[in-house]
Structures are given as C-alpha cells and as structure tokens.
Amino acid sequence: MSLDQATIRDLLRGYVDALSGADGAVLSKAIGIDGGRVLVELELPYPAQSRHLDIEREVQRLLERAPGAIAATVRVRSRALSHQVRDGLAPMSGVRNILAIASGKGGVGKSTTAINLAMALQREGARVGVIDADIYGPSVPRMLGLHGKPESPDGKSILPMRAHGLQTMSIGCLIDEDAPMIWRGPMVTQALMQLLNDTAWQDLDYLIVDLPPGTGDIQLTLCQKVPLTAAIIVTTPQDIALLDARKALRMFQKVDVPVLGIVENMAIHICSNCGHAEHIFGEGGGQRMAEQYDVALLGSLPLDRRIREQADGGEPMVLVEPESEVAMRYGDIARKMTALLSKLPRNKLLINSGLLA
C-alpha cells in the first residue's frame, strides 16, 4: 500500500498538543513522502524548544505505524505570532506582542516573577525584552545585574540594555540607583511612554512589562495608549493580596485587555532543614480567584530563599539553576501563558500589511 498525504494527515490528527489544543494535522507545515519514507515538519504557535525532541519522537512513532511506512522523520519548530490589540492602536515597531505582568499589590514577587518568566521564554527559543514600568521604584536593573547607561547612536532613540540575552530598559538605567524620582503623575506617565517608544526594540517576540503596584495613572496610560496584547496577574494566596489582584484583573477587563491567567507566588514554603511544607500565606487563593473570573491558574511558585538571593545578585533563578524544580515551574508557566496567547485572534493590521507570513 502506497502512502499519500491524506493518510499522513489522518495519522497526524492522532497527536494533540496539550497546551494549544491543536492536532498534528493543524500544526503540520510540510509533508514529504518518498516511497515508504515520510518527512513531516510541525510548527508550534508558541515557544517550546524544550519540548521539540519529545514531540518529534511521539509523532515519529505514530507515523511509523502506517501501512507501508519504513521510516519517519519529524522536525518541530516554534514560531511566535503577533496577536490582536485594542482597536485604534498600532503595533509597536520591533515588537510582536506586549505582555503586562501586574499584581495590584506590592510585595508579592511580581518583578521577580516577570524576570524569571522572561528568562524562561528565552530558554524556549523566544526573543524577549523586559521594560520596567515602575518609575518610582525600579528594580529590574538590580535583578538583571545591569550596569552603565544606554547608548543613543542617533541622539533620538536609545538602544535597549542587554542582560543575559534579554533586551531591557528601565528608568533605573538612566539615574543613580539611590536617586529618588520626585515626580508628579503626568511626568511619570510621560517618562514611561518615552521609555517604551524611544527604545529601539529589535525583533522581539514578547516584550514583558513589569508594572508597578496599583491601578492608577501608569496602569491606565499603558492600557489606553500602548498596544498591549494581554496581561498576567501575580498574587500570593493571602486574602489581602487577592483583594488587590482582583482589582488589577478587573481593570484589564474594563479596558478590553485579555487576561491570560493567574500566577500564584509564594504558595508554599518547604523548610530547607527538615523538609516540612507549610502554606504560610494561605492555600488555594489563586485557584479560587481563577475560578471566580474564569481564567487559567497558570501555576504556583514556592517561597524559596534562592529565588530572592539570586534576584538580589542579578542572576535570575532560571539562569542559575535551569534544571531545578523552581526553574521548571517557571518554564511550565511561560509555555502555558504563550500557548493561551496563541489562541487569541491574530493581528489583522500586520497580516494585511504583509509584514507577517
């Protein structure tokens, strides 16, 4: 029995990507047949480089069950596509998607989460940038070990700073670390817009925006004037933190910015001496909030001293201990959130302009 593409496509439907929900036939970009040899190329719509080999092996075994098949070669790649933003907003030059990381409340580990998720996305093969939107209390330069000032070759735009492969910008890169920003609201929002628009971002799949706490001027300006693709809410399980996290989530809903899900930080503490596990900030708060607002619980992260120590030292956990359980959790969350993002409508403006394949 000779093989044909219809037979191969039927077999590919037997593989379903757990995160995107797409089957192998939908993901296939090319099918080649030479006698009993089959070559299939699959494309995931989100960065998942760490999963490519496992998917290749699983689909290969599936295809080699076909009558007449001698051998199958499967190649998997990932591609981040640009997704829809609010009507009336144009995409930002050099950036496919802008993701806001918000909490509503300070002290829940939002900046640490944003940095480690950015590193996790980069490990999965994405081109990632981080912008520190906290003008009053910028922390990203310290967390990434940034030193020096950004360059401006043309005197108009500034080049993003580079740290561990990430493109990044922060008001903290332009002032002394201990200099207070004694500015009123309009000056702060203007500074944020300049940081965003005057930075020459270079071919980013994702620009992560580390938002300050609250739902005030900076957050509203960002939602109304910046082409945000989606948002992620970070909270602890504590009821007090959840109160403000709910406000942040509702703010995004009111301005028509999709919320991809909730990250529950500091969910559990495991004693480094005896191994005792304790829910210091309560238990199950993130899950209850996710169910209340019909969004995904992207994952839970532990209260771990190493996360804090490495952030203070300018080397994020995902970079320093990439094979640790904590780093794996960040990776899981990064893949889940971008897989959910891949299900949102594409950016029609870019498609119609011919800038996207």
Image: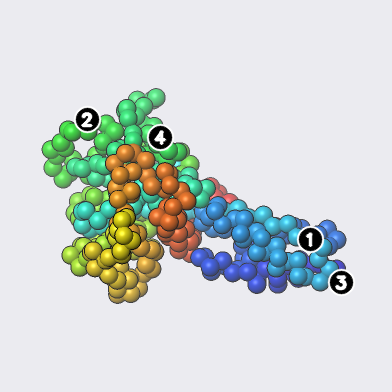
Of mark 4 and mark 3, the one earlier in the sequence is 3
Of circles 1 and 3, the one toward us is: 1
* Label 2 with label 3: CB-CB less than 8 Å: no
* Label 2 with label 1: CB-CB less than 8 Å: no
Outermost residue to the front: 274
Q: How many marks?
A: 4
Query: Which residue is drawn at the image coordinates 82% and 63% (left, top)?
Result: 70
Q: Residue tagged by mark 1? A: 71
* Label 1 with label 3: CB-CB less than 8 Å: no
Of mark 2 and mark 3, the one earlier in the sequence is 3
Q: Residue tagged by mark 2? A: 176
Of circles 2 and 1, the one toward us is: 1
- x, y percent for residue 257: 34, 61
Of mark 4 and mark 1, the one earlier in the sequence is 1
Q: Disc 2 marks which amino acid?
A: Asp
Q: Disc 3 marks which amino acid?
A: Met
Of circles 4 and 1, the one toward us is: 1
Q: Residue tagged by mark 3? A: 1
How far apart in space, not on screen, are marks 4 and 3 (Cα)?
56 Å
Foreground residue among 40 and 330: 330
Q: Residue tagged by mark 4? A: 162
Query: Which residue is drawn at the image coordinates 18% and 33% (left, top)?
Result: 178
Q: Disc 4 marks which amino acid?
A: Arg
Q: Disc 1 marks which amino acid?
A: Ala
Please tell me whether residue 236 is drawn above or below residue 209 in the rendered image. below
